[in-house]
Amino acid sequence: MEIDVNLNNKQKHWVLVIIDKCKTGLSAIFSFIWNCIKAIGRFIKRIWKILVGLAALAIFIVAAAWGYDYYTNEYIPQKKLDTAIEEITSNINSKNDSIKAQYALFVLDKKHQWGYEDVSDADISSRLAEFRESSFKLIESKAYSGDAKWQFTLGQIYRWADEQFYLVQQDFTKAAYWWNEAASNNYIQAYNNLGIAYKEGEGVKVDLRKAVEYLKKGAEAGEEWAQRNYGDLFMEGIRIKTGSHKVVRSTKEYYADDDNVISKTYDYKSMDFVTRYYEEVDDYETLIPKDIEQAKYWWKKSAAQGNEAAKERLQKIY
């Protein structure tokens, strides 16, 4: 910078001082601005680190939550289901014939409660679908072999197929057939089922004489449902038509069919015609009399074995 030569020394001094002060001031301003810029940069860098840290923490929390949810809601349940299926499958393939047959029935039973904690019975049944056909064939083979328990069970499967069992269709005739086979082998539960079948005409023709016979046989053998149902017969009373016979009737009103009229005479006292005719009268045999005491007797026997239906009967009576 050039200084006017005409300035005196004092003026030159002040000019130089001012110029120096300006330089110092500008330097300080630029230094301040630079320091501010660096401070802002450091602040932004710290904020960025904080944001990155928070983002990382958020990702970790989300990942941990997803992992926990997967572990608790998918991995653990799946592991428990796999363990249950493994145990059940080992019993399905058991070398013990009794255990194998029992699990075959469980596989076919829609309502069976497997008893595994935190494992759905529906999920287990779905996984065991592949064993249903072989399970049915096993039970069927045991019934054909003459095993009374499995003859009765096969009857149950056919009777309650749509409601309780997989694979087969409801068939009352087959149910009654297998119950009859089991009853022939003195399986007492079959007496009750067969008795009800004959009473209601399910799979067989209605035959009240056989119904009474089987229910009585079951009740006397100690079968709780037979005792309850046999007691019901005494509440209702059972009689059957055995035939009919003709009796002679007479009336002052002529309403009998011509084919049944024996004679028609005039009664002078009553001043009216008296008609004598045959009337067909049905003959009945009482198989079970109405007897509330007998009904209570059998209900009490059934209730003593824990039969809730028999207990309800007694509660209504008393």
Image (cartoon, rainbow, N blue to C red):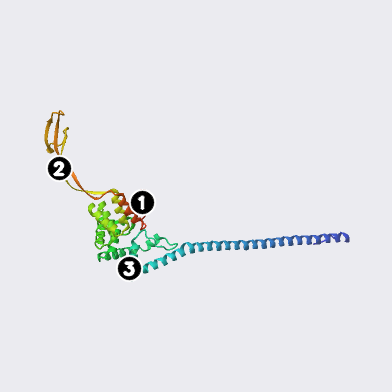
Q: Tell me which amino acid carries mark 1.
A: Leu
Q: Is residue 148 left or right of residue 81?
A: left
Q: Picture coordinates of residue 11 (x, y %)?
A: 87, 59
The numbered mark at residue 314 is 1
Residue 171 visible within the image: no
Q: Picture coordinates of residue 116 (x, y %)?
A: 42, 63
Q: Is residue 39 left or right of residue 191?
A: right
What residue is drawn where x is 58% and y is 63%?
A: 57
Callout 2: few (<14), some (14-19), or many (20+) C-alpha neighbours within 10 Å? few
**What is the secondary structure assignment of the residue under circle 2?**
strand
Q: Tell me which amino acid carries mark 2.
A: Lys
- The answer to whether the residue labelled 1 contacts the one labelled 2, judged by CB atoms less than 8 Å apart, is no
**What is the secondary structure assignment of the residue under circle 1?**
helix
Q: Picture coordinates of residue 38 (x, y %)?
A: 69, 63
Front position in the image: 22 or 212: 212
Q: Earlier in the sequence, mark 2 or mark 3?
A: 3
Q: Is residue 268 left or right of residue 53?
A: left
* Quadrant of image for the N terminus: bottom right
Kindly report the distance in space between the C-alpha atoms of the residues bearing marks 2 and 3.
61 Å
Q: Is residue 274 above or below residue 147?
A: above
Residue 176 visible within the image: yes
Residue under pointer 2: 246
Q: Picture coordinates of residue 95 (x, y %)?
A: 33, 71
Kindly report the distance in space between the C-alpha atoms of the residues bearing marks 1 and 2.
43 Å
